[in-house]
Amino acid sequence: MTALTPTAKQSQPFYPSADGEPVAETYTHLYALLTTLEVLRQYLKGRQATVLGNQFLYYAQGFPKLRVAPDVMVIFDVEPGGRDNYKIWEEGQVPVVIFEMTSGGTQAQDTGFKKTLYEQLEVQEYWLFDPKGEWIEERLQGYRLRGESYELITDSRSEPLQLRLAVEGELIGFYREDTGEKLLIPDELVEALQAEVKARQQAEERAEQAEAMLARYRERFGELPE
C-alpha cells in the first residue's frame, strides 16, 4: 500500500507595487499627473472613494502579469485612502474614471491596448490629456461608455465626477457643475489662502485704526451721543 503524503500548499502569487519605471515621461506630464491627482483627491475628500496615481491595477486574479498602471484613476464605493496597488477582485469595484497623460510616444498604447482594456473592464470614462499637444490638437479627448463601447465625449463633461473639464495651459482645469466653481490646484489654493489671510489682516488693521480713532474722540469730546 502506497502511503499518501499531503500536497504542498500552493504559494500565493506575488503582486508587485512597482517596476522601476519612471512615473512620467517628462516633468510636464508628471506635473499634470500630480496636479490632477491632488485636485480630485481634495474634491472627493469625505466620500467613499479613492484617487490613485500611477499604481498597478490588477484585473485578473492569479495572473500578476496582467496589470496596467493608469496615470490617475478614480474609484467609487471603496474605502478612502491610498493603496500600494489595486486589485479589482479584492475591492469589488472597477475604476469609474481614468486619466492618461499621453504623448506621441505613448499614443499607440493609450489608444490601442489601454483603450480596449478599459472598455472591456467597463471603466465609465477614459480621458486622454496631451499637455504638449503632440498628437491631440485640442489636447484633451475623452470617451464615455455607452453599452459595451466607448463614444467620443463632445461636451467636456465628466458625468460620474459631475465636473466640467477645460484645458488650461499644460494642466486640466476642473469646474463644479452645480456652482461653476473652479477646483483649485495646490498652487492656486496656496495663493487663495494667502489672499484670505491678507484680507483678514487688513480688516483687523482697519478695525484697530477705527478703535484708535474712537478712543481719541472720547478723550477729547467724551462719549458719543446716543
Image (cartoon, grey):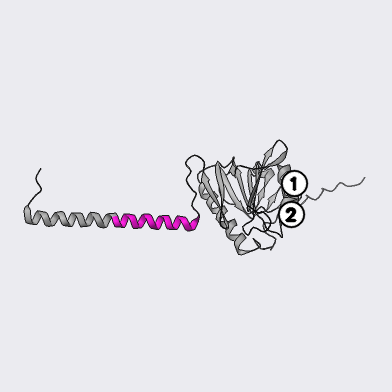
Helix, strand or loop at disc 1?
helix
Looking at this view, name the residue that lies furthest to the front: 137
Helix, strand or loop at disc 2?
helix
Please say whether residue 12 is visible from this viewpoint.
no
Residue at mark 1: 116
| Quadrant containing the C terminus in the rendered view | top left
Nearer the observer, 82 or 197: 197
User: What residue is shown at x 25% (from left), y 56% (from top)?
Assistant: 206
- Is 194 on the left or on the right of 167, as rendered? left
Q: Is residue 58 above or below residue 191?
A: above
Q: Main secondary structure of the magenta part?
A: helix
Segment colored magenta: 181-202
Residue 131's x, y, as percent? Answer: 61, 57
* Image quadrant assignment for residue 30: bottom right
User: What residue is shown at x 31% (from left), y 57% (from top)?
Assistant: 201
Tell me which amino acid carries mark 1: Thr
Residue at mark 2: 109
Nearer the observer, 24 or 82: 24
